[in-house]
Each structure stands twice: as C-alpha cells, then as structure tokens.
Image: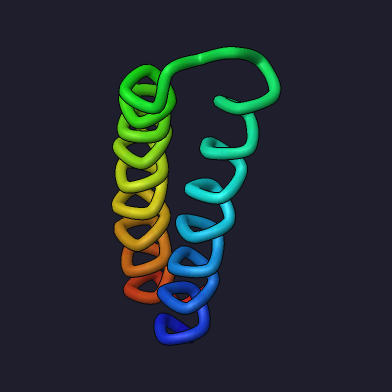
Amino acid sequence: MKDHVADGLAVTAKSSLSAAVVGATIFGYTLQEATAILGGVFILLQIVHFVWLRVSEWRAKRGE
C-alpha cells in the first residue's frame, strides 16, 4: 500500500512541476516565482503525507 502511495506522490510531484512551468508561461510568472510556489506546494504535500502515514499506523495498531 505504501509503495502505491509513494508512486502516486511521485506522479503528483512531476505533474505539479509540469503545471508550474505551464502556469508560469500562461500567467506571466517568472520561473523563480513558479519554483517558489511549487516548493510551497511540495512542502504541504510532504506534511499531508507524513500525517496520513502516522494516522494509518495508528489505525493499524488499533486494529481497524
């Protein structure tokens, strides 16, 4: 299960990078601004992923 989640997050990160580059071009952001925005999104994804793993482990210990 964790492998599928990691693969999904990797695909999401790659898609986000592509979207950031396209968005930078369309909306007139510089690549530096797009990279900063992407960095913030990536950090948020990492936090959500960490919390999701901890909740999953906690639920597994409880036997749900």
> Residue 7 placed where, x, y %?
47, 78
**Taking 50 as reference, is 60 left or right?**
right
> Residue 18 placed where, x, y %?
56, 50
> Residue 13 placed where, x, y %?
46, 56
What residue appears at the point 35 percent right and 62 percent down from the top-left corner?
53
What residue appears at the point 66 percent right and 15 percent down from the top-left corner?
27
Residue 24 sits in quarter: top right
Viewer-proximal residue, 51 or 14? Answer: 14
Residue 56 sits in quarter: bottom left
Q: Which residue lies furthest to the top in this view?
A: 28
Q: How many labels does the image show?
A: 0
Viewer-proximal residue, 29 or 13? Answer: 29
What residue appears at the point 31 percent right and 33 percent down from the top-left corner?
39
Viewer-proximal residue, 2 or 34? Answer: 34
Q: Which residue lies furthest to the right in this view?
A: 26
> Where 24 falls versus 3 (above or below)?
above
> Where 25 falls versus 63 (above or below)?
above
Q: How is the image coloured?
A: rainbow
What residue appears at the point 49 percent right and 73 percent down from the top-left corner?
5
> Where 4 falls versus 52 (above or below)?
below
Residue 28 sits in quarter: top right
**Taking 22 as reference, is 55 left or right?**
left
> Residue 1 placed where, x, y %?
49, 86
